[in-house]
Amino acid sequence: MSDSVFAQFTADDDQFAVALLVQPAINAALVHNRVPLIRHLTLVNRGTEPLSGVTLTLELLGPAGALTEPWHRSLTAPLRPGASTGFDDFRDVSPDGALLYRTDEAFPVDYRLTVAAAGKELHLVAPSRVLAHNEWFNSPALYDSLAAFVQPNTRAVEAVLRSAAQILLARTGSGSLQGYQDGSERAALIAGAVYEALRHLEITYQTLPASFENSGQKVRTTAAVLEGRLGNCLDLSVTYAACLEAAGLHPLIFISEGHAFGGFLLEEERLGSAAVTETNLLISMVDSGRAVPVELTRIGPGAQSATFTEAVRVGLGHFRGEGHRLQGVVDVHLAHRSGIRPLPSADELVTPAPVDAQTDTDTVAASLDLPPGVAAAKVRQLAEEGDEVAPPSDGSPARIQQWRKSLLDLSLRNPLLNLPKRGRGLDLHVPAGALALLDDLIHDGRQVHVIPQDDISHVHELAGARRAQDLDAEILTRELRTDRRVYGAVTEARYKTVMRTLQREARTLEQETGGNYLYLTIGTLVHTKTTGGEAYAPLFLLPVRIEGGAGRRPYAMVIDGTEVASPNYCLIEWLRVKHSVRIPELEQPVLDEHGIDIAKTLAAINTGLVDNRLNYRIDETASLRLLQFSTFQMWRDLGDHWPRFMENRSSGISSSPPAPPSTTRPGRNTRPRWLSTKPSCTCRSPPTDRRCRPS
């Protein structure tokens, strides 16, 4: 346990100074798992003379008297002036477990420390409290202690599993609850059946207190939830976790600001630790499909009741735009395996009515499938369909590849590693799950109209919407698919100015340099700057042109040429240099008949981030950007024209890379000057400085 969760109390006089680190509250779950109440005691001699015969006595006193036997220590040697000594062994200071287990309401206690020497005494009183037996202290340092409230081996859980087995039997022909033995698809069906068995019990959802962070929160046992048909989000998450673990799965409990919800690992694996608090890593775990979140507040009766498929969809919503509210996740199975023991259960047998597969048609018919968007399931499905397009290879020599790497700027001044949120460009509002559709339309050569964000219908305005971001994602996706319209982050008042300026600057740059610098960025890796802010690095780049705009016609973007979007090679090299990480699907994205297979590629990149424990995340975003950087342009030209370069330099090659020309830069469709068939000098290496550069 981190020292940060302990409270420190101090006292001093002209002879002593003492400091005592104690738990913020005495918690049955922590005592049950042998977490000491006291972390450390420090004693300092503040006087000018050595002190002999020093004794220390520590007591834990409640309203009815002592909760433990007094703790006594004596110093065997004199304590020199200015010297200090410390004590860490407080295993004997532990209240009786039976007392804690029968405590239904919190009550105050005091730690009382007495230090005596040379006829003088120093007293320190540290107030604390004993929590109720079923009370959990919500603090990031204690997240993993939540697993102590998950009791998978109770008879109440067995009753739920019997109902889940009947649902599975009716749906799949097998009622086996075999965990991961038959693969992740069966594991997801088991999780769905457990959810539906609980939903059949019509458990009423009760809201949490307005604020339960850094405070005690009572957690109902599974038996209490099932018997009373009542539970808040934390109760329901613990109950669902207990049932999943008993069924052989690895449950998760997600904790966010003022809320908790359940989930599970899609495959038989573990997180890096029992409690994970890195927000971006949590998002990547879900986006990669390795962790499946399940919202449990709609498990009750009535119109708001949701099937398992819908519960997962709502759970995924916690990771779409609200990532800042996430605080942590508990790997319950790992916590139990690591030694956090479930609290003893005194629950009597509670037997929910089994689901009758013949008569309860609503429960049996309820969907147990994962919704679209759970990446790992989608990757496997697509992989089984096969026919992946082989990645192209330019076949360039190793030295050419080495030179190309040297042309990439790996500082955050490079917009490919730190895309400016303002500047020459326009963010596009791509609805959740529609990045693949936008990629397909553009790669197919279709015009996609860019519309101002407030150009919405009057009906939507009357419904309270003010901009595209307020509309349902399905509406926006339908517009993109049917009308080929995507909304830009610009108002109608500024739309013409912004789009005309972007179009004009792109044309001017092309006329001056011969190259097109306007790109559609596809996908974003969000990483953290040393200053603490977030930096945005595009994953893939596709050259596009802006057309239209005459009269009242909207502006549109269309692919420039027949290329497939290129990976962000600066990002690839940055990950390799900074973290020694290479993600194959970032370097060579999975292709389909249109262009990049977004679902497979982003899922694989997310998996790579999780496997390497990088606290980064992938956002499914897109933007139009003018990116003017000569090193990347030369990097690309060297890749496009290396055979001609090798032909010109066939008599020998130096180890130095080519340097950018001093005036103009070659474009995509022009031959670089330094690749001229008639070099103006007789040197046998690419130009490296102004003294040796072809004219």
Image: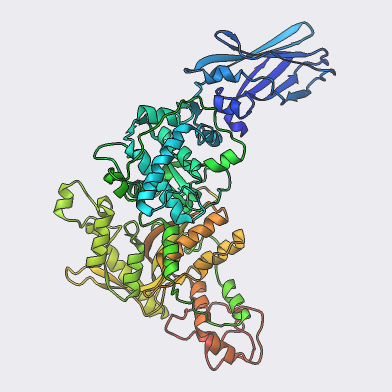
**Picture coordinates of residue 452, whole percent (x, y):** 25, 59
Which corner quadrant holds the N terminus? top right
Left or right: 378 in relation to 73: left
- In the orientation shown, which residue stands out farthest toward the right? 77
Q: Nearer the viewer, residue 228 or 407?
A: 228
- Residue at image coords 57%, 77%: 659
**Picture coordinates of residue 660, whole percent (x, y):** 54, 77
- Residue at image coords 77%, 5%: 119
- Residue at image coords 46%, 31%: 213
Q: Is residue 212 among what the camera can see?
A: no
Q: Is residue 602 among what the camera can see?
A: yes
Q: Nearer the viewer, residue 74 or 346?
A: 346
Residue 562 sits in quarter: bottom left
- In the orientation shown, which residue stands out farthest toward the bottom? 678
Q: How many marks?
A: 0
Q: Is residue 457 above or below residue 520?
A: above
Q: Is residue 474 above or below residue 102?
A: below
- In the orientation shown, which residue stands out farthest toward the top? 119
Q: Nearer the viewer, residue 259 or 303?
A: 303
Q: Nearer the viewer, residue 679 or 314?
A: 314
Q: Is residue 82 above or below residue 626?
A: above
- In the orientation shown, which residue stands out farthest toward the front? 358
Indicate how the structure is coloured in the image. Answer: rainbow
Residue 438 sits in quarter: bottom left
Residue 407 sits in quarter: bottom right
**Picture coordinates of residue 318, whole percent (x, y):** 38, 46
